[in-house]
């Protein structure tokens, strides 16, 4: 005999689950956008804070198709560009991060635990910052040696902080998305 238990989303219809799922995605993106300019004590390294939107793009893309990951990255990159300068754009780097994260064959090589998610975020953060450094280089308004000298410590600091904070964003969102997908299948 089964005992009745309440599970997130179990009582919702298909349309309502879609609305709840969209609200979770939009709400979590807004939370990450609000966290970007916020500097909590002890959360900075060399004046750099975690890249919350990159963490969100990785969390979104891990179990989705490359097109979905790239689209999420481009949209969040454009939102970030709206908050900051559009030159160079964040849309390119976050789009690449979303696409590459989605193409990882996680079922074969990467287990979803704290370490693997942190490693993915670390690598993708380094890649995103390198893409942005290449964009700065292409603009040509600063010396190449100056760009690359400042790029290395800042990219490393951002990658370390982002990878340390990645599980805080990834695991709650992943759990909610898994539950919503389980209800869609049933």
Image (spheres, helix red, strand yellow):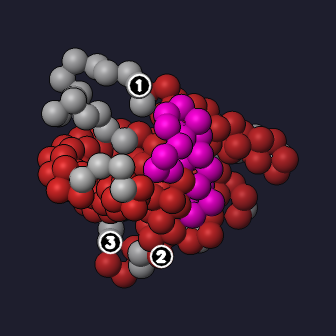
Relative to 148, 8 lies left or right: right
Residue 91 appears in the picture as rendered: yes
- The one of 134 and 159 positioned closer to us in this rendering: 134
In what quadrant of the picture does the C terminus appear?
bottom right
Q: What's the CA distance linking mark 3 and mark 2? A: 12 Å
Q: Is residue 43 above or below residue 107?
A: above
The residue furthest bottom is 108
**Pointer 1 with pointer 3, Cβ within 8 A:** no
Residue 120 appears in the picture as rendered: no
Q: Earlier in the sequence, mark 2 or mark 1?
A: 1
Q: Is residue 16 above or below residue 70?
A: above
Using the image, tell me which numbered label, if any, was put on residue 125. none
User: Badge 2: how crowded within 10 Å, few (<14), some, or many (20+)?
Assistant: some
Label 3 SS = loop
- Residue depicted at 77% across the width and 41% down the height: 19
- x then y, percent, for residue 167: 33, 45
Identify the residue position indicated by label 2 in the image.
Answer: 103
Using the image, tell me which numbered label, if any, was put on residue 37. 1
Identify the residue position indicated by label 3 in the image.
Answer: 110
Is residue 75 found inside the magenta-colored segment of the image?
yes
- The mark closer to the camera, 3 or 2, is 2
- The mark closer to the camera, 2 or 1, is 1
User: Badge 1: how crowded within 10 Å, few (<14), some, or many (20+)?
Assistant: few
């Amino acid at each position: 005999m089964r005992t009745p238990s309440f599970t997130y989303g179990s009582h919702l219809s298909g349309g309502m689950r879609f609305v709840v799922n969209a609200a979770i995605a939009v709400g979590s993106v807004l939370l990450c956008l609000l966290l970007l300019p916020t500097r909590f004590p002890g959360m900075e390294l060399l004046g750099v804070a975690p890249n919350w939107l990159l963490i969100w793009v990785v969390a979104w893309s891990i179990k989705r198709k490359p097109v979905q990951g790239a689209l999420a990255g481009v949209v969040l990159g454009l939102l970030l560009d709206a908050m900051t300068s559009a030159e160079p754009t964040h849309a390119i780097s976050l789009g690449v991060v979303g696409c590459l994260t989605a193409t990882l064959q996680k079922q074969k090589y990467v287990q979803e635990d704290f370490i693997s998610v942190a490693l993915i975020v670390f690598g993708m953060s380094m890649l995103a910052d390198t893409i942005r450094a290449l964009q700065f280089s292409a603009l040509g308004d600063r010396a190449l040696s100056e760009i690359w000298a400042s790029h290395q410590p800042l990219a490393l600091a951002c990658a370390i902080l982002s990878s340390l904070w990645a599980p805080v964003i990834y695991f709650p969102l992943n759990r909610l998305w898994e539950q919503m997908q389980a209800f869609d299948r049933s």
